[in-house]
Amino acid sequence: MAQRFPALNPTFPVLLHGGDYNPDQWQKFPEVLSEDLRLMTLAGANALSVGIFAWAALEPEEGRFTFDWLDRTMDSLERNGQKVILATPSGAKPNWMAAKYPEIRRVNDQGRRDLQQSRHNHCYTSPVYREKVTIMNSKLAERYAKHPALIMWHVSNEYGGDCHCPLCLAAFREFLKAKYKTVDALNDAYWARFWSHTFTAWEQIEALDSSVHGLKLDWMRFITRQTTDFLDHEARPLRKFTPNIPITINMMGTYYFLNYPAMANHIDIVSWDSYPSWHEWDHDTNVAMSTAFTHDLNRGIKQKPFLLMESTPSAVNWAGVSVPKRPNLHRTASLQAIAHGSDGVLYFQWRKSRGSSEKFHGAVVDHVGHENTRVFREVAKLGGDLSKLSNGPANGVMGMDTPAEVALLFDWEVRWAIDFAQGPRNQDKNYEPTVQQHYRPFWNRGIPVDVLDSTRDISRYKLVIAPMLYMLRPGVADRLKAFVAAGGTLVSTYLTGIVDENDLVHLGGLPGEGLMDLFGIWAEEIDVLPQWMKQSVEAVADNPLDLAGSFAARHYAEVLHLRGATPIATYTKEYYAGTPAVTVHKHGKGRAIYIASRNDDAFTDALIASLIQQHAIRPTLSAPLPPGVSATYRTDAQHDYVFVMNLTTDEKSVPLDAHPYQDALTLAPVSGPLNLASYETRVLIRPSRK
Ligand code: GAL
């Protein structure tokens, strides 16, 4: 049942618009600081993230704190009508601290301690750094607890990476001790007798042995655990002095080294930094699809609205070629985030710095310093639009739900396990692209999808797609069985249910943990195909999924035996020609579909099209969307906000159905077709469909 969530900070119930603001760099330029305030008003900025890398400005030498500039910043922003997302500055440690306390600097995997440089490279375990963070965060929280500008905590910046110092290694061993209790149990869990890797003392455990997959997985889990522990440590004083101010960390999409869903309960708001490579290659619709996927994944982490914490108003500066966004695309990319569940659009960065590594990174305010730039005008226009979307009928779009009937599983631990495994095929494992391959047919049709970690509750969906679910984390197999038994449709693929959470292969036939019964198959063998070897699958006549035709397959082809399932398609080549390649099996009130080979996009599209039809899954708009146009919606069960986005450089005409639509910005009635210019987005309101 669709609902409305509270605004990110219920005391400031508008869509947030603004971004990273670094007044600490400009204290010698008072005229710039006052100009910033004038420009923020013009840009429709209402929320600025302040102090992210300001430790040296807040504590220039040990124990001497200088909050005066931050006091002035907070006060002047508040007077000017802007709120503050206040950062804790741990993302960059000051030079004096790194020099005095070498232990706060990371040690790399070859045992060498970093020289002080750059940022995002402090040790998460160091008691000294933790102590310094506690002092700093307590002072910030105490000082600004009652400040009317403070609406959110931005804890650190883009947590990431690992450290191999003796303190971290000791903490890792403690983590393993708590998990396994005895070294013998750890040896069993890791199958450590292999190559004589049996451990006889905890101290023998190093983090780097990539031949022991269970150990590698635990190291990755430890990095997430230790980072989360550091986050909890940072958050403690914030929660103490400001219990009502929500806490976020800015995440990085599908960043490999942190299992973000495992961190969900430690923050109040999910936020992420989105830098799609628009225009870098000639395929903006691909970029748009994969950005939509990542927005949906971020919404899925807490299953509620999130925040686009960073995006560039024009170009980044770190790509091979950092192409500025073409006219109108900024608005569309930003509204795409809102469409998929963000309750704001924030930028890196408000103003271009004058020197150092990000001086050429896009910003709202360029070095020229005034508002007469294309980028500023586009930002200001968006600011006006966001303000209207905050105040429209039914209290605007903030907090509105996303009505997904489909869940797609994307799981960090599964990705790690697939990547760490040596074999069955080491090239083109492509876990993330494969998950996105199964997202695309929904995106093309304007069908909302929740992207979820495999441990989440899936009972409310009609359809669950679980590509390459190689590792079954505890409880997952039972949840999948219960979901199907209760009437759901599950779609899985090759490489499903092969190992347990320690990467030990299930004995007695695959897929394991009872999934042979769920799918009604036994996967005897995995054929892996080099580029030159072709395989294809051909639909069986009159199959229950209405699949027709034949489709190319590559990379993976499992050889199946039927154990109750009905074949949908069979292989056409190799020693297993004629055997089942796609199957469906009734289980309880539902059915479980198994796709045994990596088939081409046309197959995935045809299969998903048929499932959409059979399950009456509703797209955002009833008529098919022209290629390159995306549509999705948010709802509170009274009204829908419908976003129709043209991701191409061509004009597009989009048919509308018979609902009474109105333009969300002008409130004028709208009837179809919608004619969208290059990169144009329209936002419409309609009464919710029952
Ligand atoms: C982010 C980071 C920002 C800025 C930005 C540039 O990853 O959080 O501080 O560096 O990248 O694109």
Image: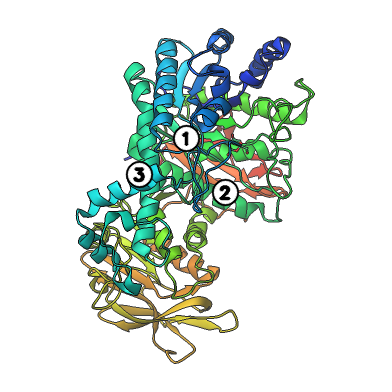
Q: Residue at x 38, y 78 (%)?
A: 543
Which residue position holds label 2? 630
Q: Earlier in the sequence, mark 1 or mark 3?
A: 1
* Image quadrant where residue 569 sits: bottom left
**Cα separation between marks 3 and 2:** 37 Å
Which amino acid type is shown beneath numbered disc 2?
Ser
Q: Residue at x 72, y 32 (%)?
A: 359
Q: Earlier in the sequence, mark 2 or mark 1?
A: 1
* Image quadrant where residue 144 sits: top left
Which residue position holds label 3? 225
Relative vertical location of residue 233 with respect to residue 411 in this rendering, above or below: above
Front one among 381 and 414: 414
In this rendering, the label closer to the viewer, 3 or 2? 3
581 relative to 519 in the view: left or right? right
Q: Is residue 312 visible?
A: yes
Which residue position holds label 1? 104
* Image quadrant where residue 187 sits: bottom left
Q: Residue at x 25, y 60 (%)?
A: 186
Where residue 365 sits: x, y (%)? Answer: 71, 25
Which amino acid type is shown beneath numbered disc 3?
Arg
Q: Earlier in the sequence, mark 3 or mark 2?
A: 3
Specify the quadrant that holds the N terminus: top left
Disc 3 packing (10 Å; few <14; some 14–19; many ≥20): some
Front one among 7 and 421: 421
